[in-house]
Image (cartoon, rainbow, N blue to C red):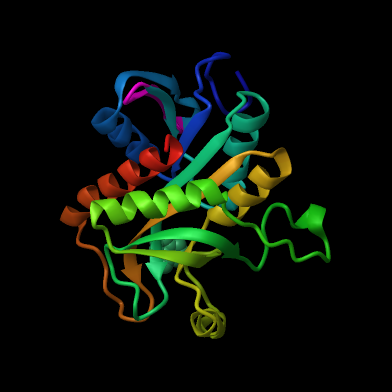
Amino acid sequence: MTVHIGAQPGDIAETVLLPGDPYRAKWAADTFLTDVKLVNEVRGMLGFTGMWKGNRVTIHGSGMGMPSLSIYVNELIKDYGAKTLIRIGSCGGMQDSVKVRDVIVAMTATTLSTPSRGIFKELNFAPCADYSLLRAAADAAEAKGTATHVGGIYSSDVFYDERPDLTEQMTRHGILGVEMEAAELYNLAARHGRRALAVLTVSDHLLTGEALPSEDREKTFGDMVEIALEAAFA
Ligand code: HPA
């Protein structure tokens, strides 16, 4: 047990999928895994371990934002030995070519700051995805026929953004979408020599104002879970 995870040693698989929402973790485990066991419920942050096509996998909520993700990922890596960590979540589209429901596989993540800022100080470290996972996820998405974009995203500290000028600059520089967790996942994976990736569904769009209807969310989230699982065990 750790401060934030009630799992026993050995309860967590080497491969961990990380949705922001703990109830998404439950839905994904119930939908895609067999032999599912609840391994954490401290503070309502649900984690489940089960089997997918003969492979052991944990699906654990990260919470929203990099400070929350940092707590869980530090403990999953340092105390439970997680080796492959894949964020599955939603993002806001930032290019006209990126449509609601499309999938983004995040090659790198731009930030204003992350919880690792204290270590990096004046250094602008470029957090990037594990290439083998990135390639496998892009292949899996293509095989499924899912409209997919591979490139840079923005990991923001705020959902209610007061800096439209920054959004404009990022769109100008080809950033595909905005979310709030991937950059620190990539920082932590780099620091500890683990594999990390973020696979994201475009749930809303900053340029068009369009949003994914709630009845479509489950299907698109399910596609993303399958892409992440296929990438993890490719
Ligand atoms: N901003 C930040 N995070 C998000 C968004 C957004 O517009 N959409 C989904 N996650």
Q: Which residues are magenta?
A: 44-54
Q: Nearer the viewer, residue 164 or 29?
A: 29
Can you see residue 129? yes
- Magenta stretch containing residue 48, yes or no? yes
Q: Does residue 28 appear left or right of residue 219 in this picture?
A: right
> Looking at the picture, how far across and down is residue 11, in whole percent?
50, 17
> Looking at the picture, how far across and down is residue 16, in whole percent?
48, 33
> Looking at the picture, how far across and down is residue 95, in whole percent?
40, 78
Above or below for 133 versus 1:
below
Name the residue at 80% across, 57% down.
120
Name the residue at 41% across, 50% down.
137
Above or below for 5 versus 146:
above
Q: Does residue 152 appear left or right of residue 191 in this picture?
A: left
Quarter of the figure with residue 169? bottom right
> Looking at the picture, how far across and down is residue 157, in whole percent?
57, 62
Displayed-image quarter of ligand 1: bottom left
- Magenta stretch containing residue 107, yes or no? no
Can you see residue 89? no
Image quadrant where one finds the N terminus: top right
